[in-house]
Amino acid sequence: MWWQYIFVFLGALLFDIVPFPFPPAFTIMMFFQIIFDLNVWLVIIIGVAGSVFGRYILLLYAPVLAKKYLKSSKNEDIQFLGDTMREKVWKGQLVVLAYSLLPLPTTPLFLGAGISKLKPRYIIPAFLVGKFTSDTVAIHLSDYASKNTQSLIDGAMSWQSVAGLILGLVMLFCLFFINWRTLIQTKKLQWDFKILN
């Protein structure tokens, strides 16, 4: 049924639209693929489209959140980080690609890009390639997962998933509390914990 694919799209979109580390979108894609016995390739294509659209929306509203909740000095600091990425387009694209191939939350990456008002063309194409590749591998492995449902449930609270969540939180912490201008210009690590208005 076609309506089941709408769940795949909306699930991936909702998982990737939130401004905090959440389980990877492929988990909800895998869930619907197993539950409804959906076509794997359609799940991948539709789910990745939902995920990319969710991240695009996050890029658009991240500056609004930052302006409302962060001090102007922290906004300028993250803007500087985005300016650096604009200057080194190919290096930035490779970082985004490599990062999106890993099973790590991409929320910090998109929050930083959104706050720095980085245009979607600097981040979305590399994310799309990495997301499509990593989700293809994950969804194809869902056949194994569907035959081992209990181990999948146990894996949701495994040390790997907990470590991924903790790493995502640490990366958000670094994004907001490191003075990036000082780090990039002088190669000195400086913390700034007064970031809220």
Image: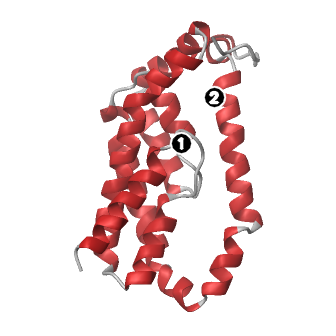
In this rendering, the answer to whether 165 lies above or below 188 is: below
Q: In which quarter of the image is residue 119?
A: top left
Q: Can residue 78 be seen in the rendering of this structure? A: no
Residue 7 is left or right of residue 189, and the answer is left
Residue 107 is tagged as 1
| Label 1 CA crowd tier, 10 Å (few <14, some 14–19, many 20+) | many
> Split into 4 quadrants, where in the image is the C terminus?
top right
Residue 52 is left or right of residue 1, and the answer is right
- Residue 65 horizontal/vertical position (percent): 50, 24
Q: How many marks?
A: 2
In this rendering, the answer to whether 15 lies above or below 2 is: above
Q: Mark 2 points at which residue?
A: 175
Of the pair 155 and 83, the residue shown nearer to us? 155
Q: Residue at x 41, y 69 (%)?
A: 136
Q: In which quarter of the image is residue 69?
A: top right
At mark 2, the secondary structure is helix
- Residue 132 horizontal/vertical position (percent): 37, 60
Q: Can residue 62 be seen in the rendering of this structure? A: yes
- Whole-Å distance between the Cαs marked 2 and 1? 11 Å
Q: Residue furthest left?
A: 2
Task: Tell me the kind of residue under disc 2.
Answer: Leu
